[in-house]
Image (cartoon, grey):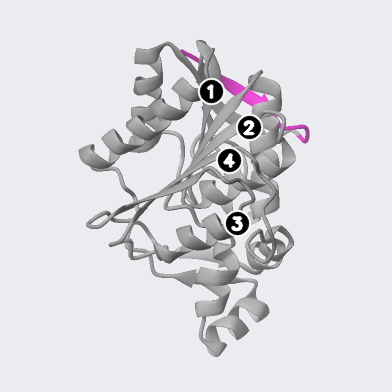
Amino acid sequence: MMAGRLDRGDGTQLAWEKQEGRGPTIVFLPGFRSDMTGDKATGLAAFAAARGQAMLRFDYSGHGASDGDFLDGTIGIWAADALAAIDQLSTGDLVLVGSSMGGWIALLTAIARPERVKALVGIAAAPDFTQLLMWDSMAPAERLKLIQDGVLHIPSRYDDPTPITRRLIDDGRNHLVLPHPIPFAGQVRLLHGQADPDVPWELALRIAERITSQDVRITLVKDGDHRLSRPQDLALLYRTVGALLDQNGP
């Protein structure tokens, strides 16, 4: 296992960990306010190590051990972080695994690097969430406060109240993927809990409808929550990723 810090080009250092091994390289893309030390990321790293598989994980700016202020972050910035890490820290074919917001980042990465991304796994993937799940669900008074103050704090069941910035909402509109076909021809596997209180499982159906690949499969976990990090959920993730690695490996 190797670890280090990557200058993304403006002095901001992104924390990363990777292990060498056979390709394709697994790349884990964390969720909103999450990082590379969560159960899914570390479990997948152990799974990859046991297989002798290459894997890369990292923290977006403003997340985990990386530099930066979370409040300065946007979808565009975090997607650029992902491309910087992938371009400078990995080679060859990739299998992207994106959790929640990471599913949106994975789709943007697949669009930007179609020659490298062979497969994509979404775990409660949440593309366009800044519009669909934040802005569209806000009351008029909340929208007004966000516009006037530049930030709105909303309750979170996982942590302290979540600060939502106007910058995040405005920038998110520049990166929406669901209004039009999503140009990706690789394999897509979408895992989603039907007891997810944060991201409706029906969103997986919209992703499947929009993506141009014909090899798209959805697995719904009836009692699964948003995190899908119970032992049985992780076992499903490993089976799913392992099958894609076997199909795309040497």
**Magenta residues, start to end:** 1-10
Which quadrant of the figure has residue 62?
top right
Residue 134 seen: yes
Q: Earlier in the sequence, mark 2 or mark 1?
A: 2
Residue labelled with disc 4: 60
Tell me the SS state at disc 1. Answer: helix
Tell me the SS state at disc 2. Answer: strand
Q: Disc 4 to disc 2, how far (Cα)?
A: 19 Å
Tell me the SS state at disc 4. Answer: loop
Q: Can you tell which mark lies on residue 71?
A: 3
Residue labelled with disc 2: 117
Q: Are marks 4 and 2 in contact (CB under 8 Å)?
A: no
Residue at position x 46%, y 58% in the image: 204
Q: Are marks 3 and 2 in contact (CB under 8 Å)?
A: no
Q: Earlier in the sequence, mark 3 or mark 2?
A: 3
User: Majority secondary structure of the magenta segment?
Assistant: strand
Q: Earlier in the sequence, mark 3 or mark 4?
A: 4
Name which residue type carries label 3.
Answer: Leu
Label 3 environment density (alpha carbons within 10 Å; few <14, some 14–19, many ≥20):
some
Q: Earlier in the sequence, mark 4 or mark 1?
A: 4
Residue at position x 53%, y 48% in the image: 103
